[in-house]
Amino acid sequence: MRLQQKGNTDYRKRLKLLKSGLPRVVVRKTDSTIIGQVVEYAEAGDKTLVTVYGRELKKYGWAFSPKNIPASYLTGFLLARKSSAKEAILDKGGRTLKKDSFIYYFLKGAQDGGLNLHAGELPISEDRLYGSHIAKHYENKKGNQFHLVGEKVKGMREEVNKVIDNIKQHGN
């Protein structure tokens, strides 16, 4: 009752999600990483089937931030590969999804990893998926400590594809 008064849980939306009978994909972003979970309803309390953190991507060769758009895609891909669930539904909590939200990229990664999400068409940009927006940020940063980062970011497409291959080989 206390959570409902504070507005932390919308029980009508939660009931709709639970009536689907499908496990829920929960995505959150912290100051340092992205967290993805597959959660299943249980009468005694929700049961987390699998949890994946963006920082786990380092094990697969990811050398960039664990919370940017490409990392969000890769974290979703890793979640799908580690999950035994074949089908799920998004539980976005109280969030309103905005254009280019990291959640869309997470969902796209999960779909590409083999998880059937009832999400419809996802509005993602391939340029953002491969970090061109990050490279553009570092374009004018010549001659300082950011110069090397800018050069490294230009090859992010290859890095993303390399990490996907590594997850496919070792991510189960």
Image: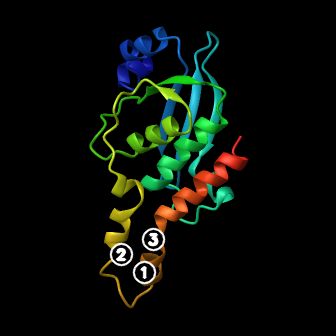
Is any atom of residue 70 visible in this view? Answer: yes
Residue to which mark 1 is pinned: 146
Residue to which mark 3 is pinned: 153
The quarter of the image holding the C terminus is top right
- Tell me where residue 160 appears, x and y as whole percent: 52, 58
Q: Amino acid at mark 3?
A: Val
- Tell me where residue 137 appears, x and y as whole percent: 32, 71
Q: Are marks 3 and 2 in contact (CB under 8 Å)?
A: yes
Left or right position of 102 against 38: left
SS type, badge 2? helix
| The quadrant where residue 82 appears | top right
Which residue in the rendered view is the most extreme toward the bottom? 143
What residue lies at 48% left-to-right and 40% top-to-bottom?
Answer: 28
Residue to which mark 2 is pinned: 138
Alpha carbons under labels 1 and 3: distance apart: 11 Å
The vertical placement of 155 against 125, above or below, is below
What residue lies at 48% left-to-right and 49% top-to-bottom?
Answer: 72
Q: Amino acid at mark 2?
A: Tyr
